[in-house]
Amino acid sequence: MKTSIYHHLESIDSTQAFARANRSSFDPKAFTVITSKEQTKGRGRLSRSWYSPKGTNLYTTYSFTLPKLEHSLNPLTLVLALSISEVLQKLGLTVQIKWPNDLYIHSKKISGILAEVEACAEGSQVYLGFGLNINMTANELQTQKFKATSLLMETGKKWSLQVLSSAIENAFKRDLSIFIEKGFSPFHKPFEELSFFQSKVVKLDLGNEVIAGNYKGVNEEGALILELPDSQVKAFLSGEVIGWE
Ligand code: BTN
């Protein structure tokens, strides 16, 4: 796997925005890791913001290029979710992955992933960002609009951001090599074992309509498969999950 190059920032609007703005100065052969102690304009999916207080959590973007591959890059968020899950599981935690980009513990969000991909000379330029709540306290978590948790809340102790950051990077670089060679297949079963939606009915907002269906897994492209009330089975690559039961 490519050599890592690090940019550890004190403060930035968004590690994702920093990566995009500085990409031309990055070595396209390297795996560039951007972390910041805080983000003043952390970005989530669907134009949401990502609360990024100073020194308490991990805010990271991986910037790397990929050659043209036979398989879809969509499942990259699921692959990173699995790499982060593995690290958290080693701490004794029970983690679930909520398609397409969230990690949950005890039905509360602990991590969110944001993938941005663009075409480039080498093939694809990927900016894969994640926020992982580590030492955030109950008071800070209460400021969130959704139910959120942190490693501190789940384990009762504080964790080193650096140790976890390295562990996640190592796990992801290993998984990325496997993904480049084999696509999503080796990750399919591990993903379904951790899938938050197992045996659930999922409500999906498609923009022009809202549908609900029984969760049937994800496919090799990372699309969500639902069985609709008329028994049709359909795959959805995008859409926002707005409910489940
Ligand atoms: C989501 O759950 O909507 C995705 C959140 C992604 C947040 C991370 S924090 C590091 C990187 N920089 C950003 O501005 N966003 C991502």
Image: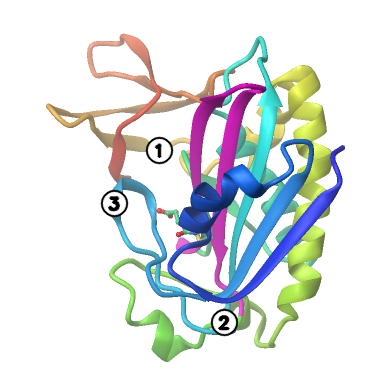
In the image, residue 52 lies at what x, y percent? 46, 74
Position of 238 compared to 170: left or right? left
Q: Distance between the residues labelled 2 and 1?
A: 26 Å
The residue under label 1 is 200
| Farthest residue, direction left | 208
Quick check: 73 above or below 232?
below
Magenta span has 48? no
The residue under label 2 is 153
Q: Residues within 10 Å of mark 1 (few under 14, many from 20)?
A: some
Magenta span has 108? yes
> Magenta segment, which residues?
107-134
The residue under label 3 is 47
Quick check: 2 above or below 110?
above
Q: Distance between the residues labelled 3 and 2?
A: 27 Å
| Farthest residue, direction front | 25
Query: Which amino acid, by three-letter code, is at mark 3?
Result: Ser
Q: Nearer the viewer, mark 3 or mark 2?
A: 3
Q: At numbered mark 3, what does the secondary structure look like: helix, strand or loop?
A: helix
What residue is drawn where x is 78% and y is 36%? 29
Query: Which amino acid, by three-letter code, is at mark 2?
Result: Met
User: Residue 8 occupies which quadrant of the picture?
Assistant: bottom right
Res. 81 in view: no
* Majority SS type along the magenta span: strand
Q: Which of 141 and 25 is in front in this view?
A: 25
